[in-house]
């Protein structure tokens, strides 16, 4: 579990900002931790949760999220909806979009339908916790039939806040999509900053739109490399940080992992009682580079969103990139290049001209990329559309609840996403 001090700070901050948030059984958890129950943010108060811990430890991510969603739907008076990752909340609500008739039937009958990844003995134990609720089932049917904009607040009218363990970096895409549609009108609160499995900071300002984290000196040993890096790599400590500057995190948190570069860059936003307050800037581990050009994750995403905005009716659901070296012989004899796999809503196909818009945006936004493209050192970007649900399958295949990668580095995951291409 999270350090007790961290969880108690979270619970105190949550109660101060949202007075009814600590109501008994008023929190539902949507999170997958295969093989062992996930320790929720409020674990010192297990009476907060209406979702059984066993549901999150199922071998299948899809099954775990559906079971937790069913238990959440039973509790109309929910105050807090908590997810380990924004992608988990996104995928659970996507399952509601496609599977609400079955969920309504299970609610009405007080049963848990068999499904892949749900062992029969576990299903029996979880089903024993259910009771028929035809009134709630009818309410679910009526609200889903109206459409899904603002569906979360309509299903749980007393809900105060959405707590998401990780909502920055790669997860920001899902938060933005949820704010505009399913979770319209509800605040998001990202309470913790974690890296390499270690808790490093807590967000004491839940009502601010950009998460800021107070770094706590006793939870792990942190060092910081000033950015941009100099020839001499000399780290500084917590007490040597300067407001407004950016630093790469170097972490010593677990046995056998000594002074590891976490690949995360933080900006010092200020200080709180002499402890630094930081904002997450980027993950350098997710930069694209086939000729040393280094296009960062967040800047690539901005270029991609700009290109999508030029395709009438299109909305970006998800994406992932591959450097052509991972493709091996299948990439052909062309120069090194990027391949982008994306899921769109509102468009079934793209013309060659539309596909070229992304390469054009990258050339406009990154002069070094444009220079390599002009010289032929980098080949044209290749864009592939994948079918609905492809990225949920990819997250299941990752095997652990980690923030979504934006650059694939494993052949097995590449083969999976290639198998979902529709255009």
Image: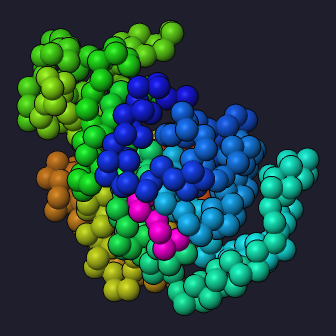
Residue 207 highlighted magenta (yes or no): no
Q: Quadrant of the C terminus?
A: bottom right
Q: Main secondary structure of the magenta part?
A: loop
Residue 186 position within the rendered picture, expressed as x and y whole percent measured from the top left: 37, 67
Relative height, residue 157 to residue 374 (above, below): below
- Left or right: residue 274 versus residue 393 is left
What residue lies at 60% left-to-right and 53% top-to-bottom? 25
Residue 158 highlighted magenta (yes or no): yes
What residue lies at 46% left-to-right and 24% top-to-bottom? 3
Q: Quadrant of the N terminus?
A: top right
Relative height, residue 253 to residue 196 (above, below): above
- Left or right: residue 295 versus residue 411 is left
Tell which of 182 and 339 is nearer to you.
Answer: 182
Q: Can I make out residue 289 in this image?
A: no
What residue lies at 28% left-to-right and 40% top-to-bottom? 204
Within the image, what quadrant is residue 246 found in? top left
Q: How many marks?
A: 0
Within the image, what quadrant is residue 207 found in? bottom left
Q: Can I make out residue 52 in this image?
A: yes
Relative height, residue 345 to residue 279 (above, below): below
Residue 72 position within the rendered picture, expressed as x and y whole percent measured from the top left: 63, 62
- Left or right: residue 25 versus residue 385 is right
Residue 35 position within the rendered picture, expressed as x and y whole percent measured from the top left: 73, 35
Residue 83 position within the rendered picture, expressed as x and y whole percent measured from the top left: 52, 51
Q: How is the image coloured?
A: rainbow
Per the rendered image, the range of residues in magenta is 156-162
- Left or right: residue 365 versus residue 68 is left
What residue lies at 48% left-to-right and 57% top-to-bottom? 80
Relative height, residue 384 to residue 378 (above, below): below
């Amino acid at each position: 579990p999270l350090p007790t001090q961290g969880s108690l700070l979270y619970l105190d901050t949550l109660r101060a900002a949202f007075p009814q948030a600590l109501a008994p059984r008023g929190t539902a958890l949507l999170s997958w931790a295969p093989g062992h129950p996930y320790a929720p943010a409020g674990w010192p108060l297990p009476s907060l949760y209406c979702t059984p811990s066993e549901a999150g430890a199922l071998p299948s991510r899809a099954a775990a999220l559906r079971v937790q969603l069913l238990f959440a739907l039973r509790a109309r008076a929910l105050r807090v909806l908590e997810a380990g990752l924004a992608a988990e909340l996104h995928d659970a609500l996507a399952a509601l979009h496609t599977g609400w008739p079955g969920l309504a039937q299970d609610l009405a009958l007080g049963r848990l339908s068999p499904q892949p990844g749900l062992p029969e003995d576990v299903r029996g134990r979880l089903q024993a916790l259910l009771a028929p609720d035809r009134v709630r089932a009818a309410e679910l049917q009526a609200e889903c039939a109206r459409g899904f904009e603002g569906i979360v607040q309509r299903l749980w009218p007393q809900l105060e806040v959405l707590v998401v363990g990780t909502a920055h970096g790669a997860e920001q895409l899902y938060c933005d999509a949820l704010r505009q549609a399913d979770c319209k009108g509800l605040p998001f609160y990202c309470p913790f900053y974690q890296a390499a499995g270690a808790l490093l900071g807590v967000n004491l300002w839940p009502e601010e739109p950009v998460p800021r984290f107070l770094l706590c000196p006793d939870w792990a040993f942190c060092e910081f490399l000033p950015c941009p890096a100099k020839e001499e790599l000399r780290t500084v400590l917590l007490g040597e940080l300067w407001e407004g500057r950016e630093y790469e995190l170097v972490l010593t948190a677990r046995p056998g992992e000594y002074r590891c570069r976490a690949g995360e860059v933080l900006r010092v936003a200020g200080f709180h009682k002499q402890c630094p307050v930081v904002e997450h800037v980027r993950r350098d581990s997710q930069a694209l580079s086939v000729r040393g050009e280094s296009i960062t994750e967040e800047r690539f995403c901005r270029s991609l969103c700009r290109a999508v905005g030029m395709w009438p009716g299109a909305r970006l659901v998800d994406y992932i990139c591959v450097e052509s070296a991972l493709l091996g012989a299948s990439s052909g004899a062309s120069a090194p290049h990027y391949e982008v796999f994306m899921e769109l809503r509102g468009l079934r196909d793209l013309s060659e001209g539309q596909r070229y818009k992304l390469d054009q945006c990258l050339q406009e936004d990154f002069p070094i990329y444009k220079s390599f493209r002009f010289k032929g050192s980098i080949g044209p970007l290749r864009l592939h559309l994948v079918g609905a649900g492809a990225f949920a399958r990819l997250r299941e295949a990752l095997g652990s609840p980690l923030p979504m990668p934006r650059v694939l580095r494993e052949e097995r995951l590449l083969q999976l996403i290639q198998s979902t291409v529709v255009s």
